[in-house]
Structure formats: C-alpha cells, structure tokens
Amino acid sequence: MDIDCTYLPYNETAYFTDLVLDYLDGSDALKNYYKYTPDKAGIKQAIEQRPGFPVNRQLLVNTLQKQYEGLQADEKVTRNIQLLSEENTFTICTAHQPNLLTGYLYFIYKIVHAIKLADELNSEYPGKHFVPVYYMGSEDNDLEELGTFRYAGQKFVWDARGQTGAVGRMKTDSLKLLLGDLFKLLGPPGTNAEQLQKTITEAYLKHNTIADATQYLVNELFGRFGLVILNPDDAELKRAILPILQDDLENHIAYAIVNETTDNLGEQYKIQAHPRYINLFYMKDNIRERIEKKGGQWIVLNTDIKWTAGELKAELEQHPDRFSPNVILRGIFQESILPDIAFIGGGAEVAYWLELKDLFHHYKVFYPTILLRQSVQWITPQQDALRKKLGFSVADMFKSESSLIRYYIAHHGTNNWQTADEMNAIEEVLMQLKQKANALDVTLNASAEAVLARIRKQLVNLEKKMLRAEKRKMQDQVQRIINLKNSIFPDYKLQERQDNFVGYYAALGPQYLDVLYNNIAALRNQFLVISQQA
C-alpha cells in the first residue's frame, strides 16, 4: 500500500488544550507537576530511577499466567510475561476501558504507540527488556459510553438487558443481535472482512464476559507484537495496595493532597478530575457505587450496605477485589503492580496525571514518564485526490471550513471580492475628514468617530455580501470543500473520537496495524496524518 505521511505540530491542529500544548512545549508553568520530560531524556532518567521502586514481580507474572489460561498466546507474549519476573524488565503501559469492539480509534492508537515505544527502547537499551502492556479498565461502569461504537455512518448501541455495575463483568449473551446488524454492513467483501467477522464472533459470542471478550479480541489483533493484557480486577493485585486503600477510607489523604495541587493548577488551566473524600467504589455483583463516610459509618450509595470501622476493615481484608479505585487512585494502583517507566494516554489522561505527582510522592509510588498518545488522521485515496485537486495542503485541512472556502475563492474566483485595498483608501479619506472636523470644533470628534465606525461596519458587510455572491457562482466547488472537510472530520471531530477500527481492518486486514506501527513516531510528539494513495 502506497501512503504519504505528514507530521504536524499539535498546536497547528486546533484540537488540543492549552495544558497539553504547554506540557509538550516544556512550559515553566507546568514543571512542578511532573517528574520526567516526555522525551528520550525523560525516558532515560525514568529507566535509571525505576529500580528504586520495586513491585511484586512474581505476583504480576502469576496473575498474568492465570489470566492467559485458555487463551492462545503468541510466543512473544509468553516470553514477555516470563521476562517480567526479571529486574531488568520494564513496562510501557497504556490504559483504556473495554469498549465494545474497542470503541473509538484512539483505543487502537494508544496500543500501537505503546508497542512501538517498547520496541524502540528494546533496540536502544540491549541490556534491558521493555514490555508493552494494555491495562484494561474493566471496572468502569459507564455502559452508555462503553457499549457504543460507530461504523458505516451508523451508531451501534448495546442493549445489555438491564445489566449494571462494572462493564468488564457484564455477560455477553445479549450481543448476538447487535453483531448480526453489524455483519450485514461489514465490508468490503473478501478475506479480511470474513476473518474479522470470525474474530469478533469468537470474541463476543464465545466468551462469557466483556473483559474476557476484550482480552481475546485485543490479543488476536496485537498478540503478534508481544502486547501483554492485564485485567486489574483481581483480589491479589489489590491486596498489594491494601494500606493505601485503608488510608483513603479512613484519612482522606488523597483528597487533601490532590486538592492542593488542583487549587494551584486551576489558576491557569481547566482541572480534569476532582478528588473526593473517599476515592473508591464498592463493587459486588451488579453494583459499582461510591463509598461515603457518614458519622461513624461507611455507606455504599444507592444501596443498604454500610459498615462500622471494624466491619469495613474486615471486608477490605477479605474481599479487596470489591474495592475499585476511581480516577484519582487508579494510577497509584497501576504503578504499584507494574514496573512502568512510561504511561501513554490521551489529552484528558495527561491532564489528570499532572494532578497526581504529589500523591505518588506521599505514598512512595513511582511516578512514570507521561506521554501523549499518538493522534492519527487517515485520509483515503478519494479524499486525498480531491484535496490535491482543490489545491490544499494536508495542514490546510485542519483550518476551519470558512477559512478554506475563503482561501479557495481568493485564489480561484472569477472576481476579486476582497476589499482590503479599497478599505484602506476609504479609511485614509475618512481620517482626513475626521481631522477637518476636529480642526473646526473638537466637540465634533465623537460624532466623527461614530460616522467612521458606521462606515467601516458597512464596508465589512459589503465585503461579506460580495463573498456570498462569489460563493454562489462557485457553488459546486464550495460544496466539494464542505464535503471534503466533513468526510475527513466527521461532525467536526477528529476521526479517532468518532470512528471504529472495523472499517479500516475489514478493508486492509493486518496491514492496517502494520502501517500504523511503521509510521507512529513514539517520541516525536506530533500529529500524524496518513494519506493513502490510489
């Protein structure tokens, strides 16, 4: 497949927050909120310092081996799991919930980014090993988000038949109808689409839970790259952070520390996540509800469950798997069980990780290098041909629709609708009139200014009317620009926040992932546009 790749600075795309852009730019305003810079130097420093924060490697390996029982794992995966028992092995982690059929494209990009960085570091540091890990956020209970994906212009929504609680624990037996509707549209016909249908069917109709189905699907897609999948919904893994869970329930340390950070950070940036007095959910059967302390008791919201201090301690020790960290404690849990040196996340994840450094320091947990995941825009051969025909660069496509239209008409219009030269000439005459009025009577200055402002406004309105007239003459070309912009940015959003991987994989098969892998630049910190050629 013939492709062209363009790398653009994130600040030229208009899709990223000031915090993310300042973080990538190394702004002084953010330097107190992270430990390692998101580049080679930061990674090197993290590798050097990570051994000072040991994790229970045998527990990790045992858990992974148990979770991979019955799954056909690639030799690379099996070897990577075994390597995790060695002190010179580190992980590159990315995390996401088990969205149905992976949800949006950024799920795929996160994982490929982690794989690519691990491979680059394995080449750069031959005496060490780096393992890419997908950390499954299986305890999330937002079914509305996780049970939805889009394909072929349609929105697919899973009717989970009243199931509630952690989505990863939900049963898959009600998915047959939805998948049947998907398969009617799946194309183009051929080996890739047929194989993908078999893989999806095996994943969701032959595995009992969403977590197991997601593990199977992700392993089928990425096992050949050596990706290791970890489901943290495990009693023994959580037992490793029991003192931290107990501390949060009793002393609300995270609330105090993170609040102080967000108070300072919030003076300049929007805060992504706010801590609670208790940053844990209680998760049992079909519930996942917040825990609150009222008087001398701890209660689970929207249930009749409550404990005294002694009862809570006993419940925590006997069933640590029932206590689910929220966004504030999730990273602490992750870094306590994985020998991470880097975490790869989207803009929102970068934002809330910058709130947590002091909390990690308090609990003496390693704070990794935080990397913005690779963003990718895929342009089809038809879109690329039209872009070139209209005379736009790849970077131009990130400009607003109105800017593109104005640019096109200015360069291809039959009449010159722009009035800048005339406006400058008129402005000069108007200023002369104003000076004359002032010379006669200074009290006329306000009246002269009002007249000037009115004329300027009328001239601007006249130019807009002239532009509209030119647009009408070039209606076909204008519509092509609108259609092109909308096809590349559906609903004015990045593809990665709208589309699912199914369409790309059905058309291209495993080659789709290979193209992403070959062109994602793990530490370049730039937006990638892949233009597929005819």
Image (cartoon, rainbow, N blue to C red):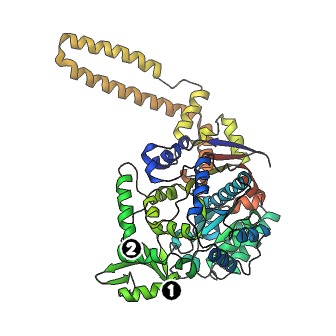
Q: Nearer the viewer, residue 295 or 490?
A: 295
Q: Nearer the viewer, residue 509 or 366?
A: 366
Which amino acid, by three-letter code, is at mark 2?
Ile
Whole-angstrom CA distance, mark 2 to mark 1, is 18 Å
**Whether residue 374 can be seen here:** no
Name the quadrant of the C terminus: top right
Which amino acid, by three-letter code, is at mark 1?
His
Taking the spot 49% from the left edge, 76% from the top edge, the residue there is 324
Q: Nearer the viewer, residue 211 or 187?
A: 211
| Label 2 sits on residue | 278
State the mark number for residue 319: 1
Place of residue 377 in the rendered image (x, y in percent of width and height, measured from the top left): 64, 49
In which quarter of the view is residue 59 placed?
Answer: bottom right
Q: Nearer the viewer, residue 477 or 253?
A: 253
**Whether residue 387 can be seen here:** yes
- Check the image and report above or below for 393 versus 374: above
Place of residue 156 in the rendered image (x, y in percent of width and height, measured from the top left): 60, 68
Report whether 168 appears left or right of 33. Answer: right
Report whether 498 appears left or right of 61. Answer: left
